[in-house]
């Protein structure tokens, strides 16, 4: 679990040390266990309906399907805990995917790692643009990233000019990243797992990571306490952009065929997965583990409902209902936390 404050009244960057830390940590763990239970129940029900749902190929397809969304949800969660949001991640993914595919096609002799670095760096540059406009120019993140969503997508369309990079144009070693497995687990899924663990460790173990929660809980109080708020928010956007660039690289490696429409509409899925995973849309609480579980849950729903022969419309309705339930639960927990704090002050006084 990360060391988030888990509420809206505590600017302390080390929330586990306050009196409510244990209760909040238990609440987050219960919520994430609930997500695991929901995923397990859905898998079992679908398997009972059609045993082929848990075939080796089907499991690999589910893991691959969740990979990109998980990586993007981890980055989005890091931004949302600071009380911001990034709506441009789908466009950044698409731009990075086309960039790395075009680069490796133009320079087939360069090492694969150079192409990967190109995709991640381009994503980081997009994050720098977003972070600078939000943290330095003080423009609301919703407005900034809504604008850059279209700017980055426009650059992608201008660059592609209606063309497409096919798998036959890419090096076999690069395509192997998206198609090889280790002990039956696809390499992209292992990369996503590593991203989740590293990000979770950073947010829990490092002061700069814990300060992101303090910023999301009370930005003014965090600034008064000496936390470099603008720098931390800028860093969160750069990290998010870098992860979107990494997701673009993995997309190109997995699918091989890349055009300017890649990633269209994915930003809403990412925000949905993050909120369903327990990251409060108002900032200050949630974990990247929960965001990852939210991504896995939405991906599993997307895979299970067609097997259960349920209309695509209901998939969207279920996702919308999960978002509303998540926001309602966040509000309920915030009210309970505030009430406990008031009771604590009365007993203490």
Image: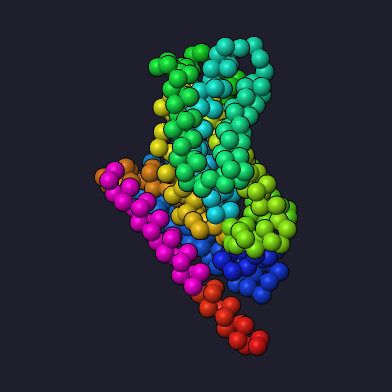
Was residue 23 drawn as part of the magenta stretch in this picture? no
Q: Nearer the viewer, residue 262 or 170?
A: 262
Residue found at x 53% / y 65%: 30
> Is 279 on the left or on the right of 319, as rendered?
right
Main secondary structure found in the magenta portion: helix
Which residues are drawn in magenta?
312-335
Q: Quadrant of the N terminus?
A: bottom right
Residue at x 53%, y 78% (from the top left corner): 339
Residue 246 can be seen, yes or no: no
Judge whether 347 appears above or below 41 on screen: below
Image coordinates of residue 213 in percent, x first then y, are 62, 58
Q: What number of labels is visible?
A: 0
The correct choice, above or below, for 267 with respect to 217 in the image is above
**Residue in the foreground of this view, choosing between 81 and 53:** 81
Identify which residue is drawn at 55% across, 36% down: 244
Closer-to-camera residue (107/36): 107
The structure's colour scheme is rainbow
Q: Please report the residue visible at 45 percent of the width from the left and 20 percent of the height from the top.
A: 158
Most extreme residue toward the front is 137
């Amino acid at each position: 679990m990360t060391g988030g404050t888990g509420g809206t009244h505590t600017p302390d960057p080390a929330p586990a040390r306050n009196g409510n830390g244990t209760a909040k940590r238990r609440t987050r763990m219960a919520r994430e266990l609930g997500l695991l239970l929901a995923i397990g129940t859905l898998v079992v029900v679908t398997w009972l309906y059609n045993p082929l749902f848990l075939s080796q190929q089907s499991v690999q397809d589910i893991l691959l399907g969740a990979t990109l969304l998980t990586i993007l949800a981890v980055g989005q969660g890091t931004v949302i805990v600071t009380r911001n949001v990034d709506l441009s991640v789908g466009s950044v993914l698409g731009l990075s995917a086309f960039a790395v595919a075009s680069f490796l096609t133009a320079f087939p002799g360069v090492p694969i790692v150079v192409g990967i670095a190109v995709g991640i760096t381009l994503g980081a540059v997009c994050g720098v643009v977003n972070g600078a406009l939000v943290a330095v120019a003080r423009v609301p993140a919703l407005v900034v990233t809504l604008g850059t969503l279209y700017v980055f997508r426009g650059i992608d369309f201008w660059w592609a000019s209606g063309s497409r990079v096919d798998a036959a144009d890419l090096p076999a070693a690069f395509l192997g990243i998206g198609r090889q497995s280790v002990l039956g687990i696809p390499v992209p899924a292992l990369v996503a797992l590593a991203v989740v663990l590293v990000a979770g460790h950073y947010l829990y173990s490092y002061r700069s990571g814990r300060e992101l929660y303090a910023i999301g809980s009370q930005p003014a109080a965090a600034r008064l306490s000496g936390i470099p708020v603008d720098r931390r928010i800028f860093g969160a956007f750069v990290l998010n952009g870098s992860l979107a660039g990494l997701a673009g690289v993995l997309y190109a490696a997995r699918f091989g065929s890349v055009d300017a429409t890649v990633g269209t509409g994915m930003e809403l899925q990412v925000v949905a997965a993050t909120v369903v995973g327990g990251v409060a849309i108002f900032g200050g609480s949630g974990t990247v583990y929960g965001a990852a579980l939210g991504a896995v849950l939405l991906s599993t729903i997307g895979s299970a409902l067609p097997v259960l022969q349920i209309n695509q419309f209901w998939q969207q309705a279920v996702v919308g209902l999960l978002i509303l339930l998540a926001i309602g639960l966040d509000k309920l927990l915030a009210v309970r936390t505030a009430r406990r704090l008031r009771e604590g002050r009365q007993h203490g006084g």
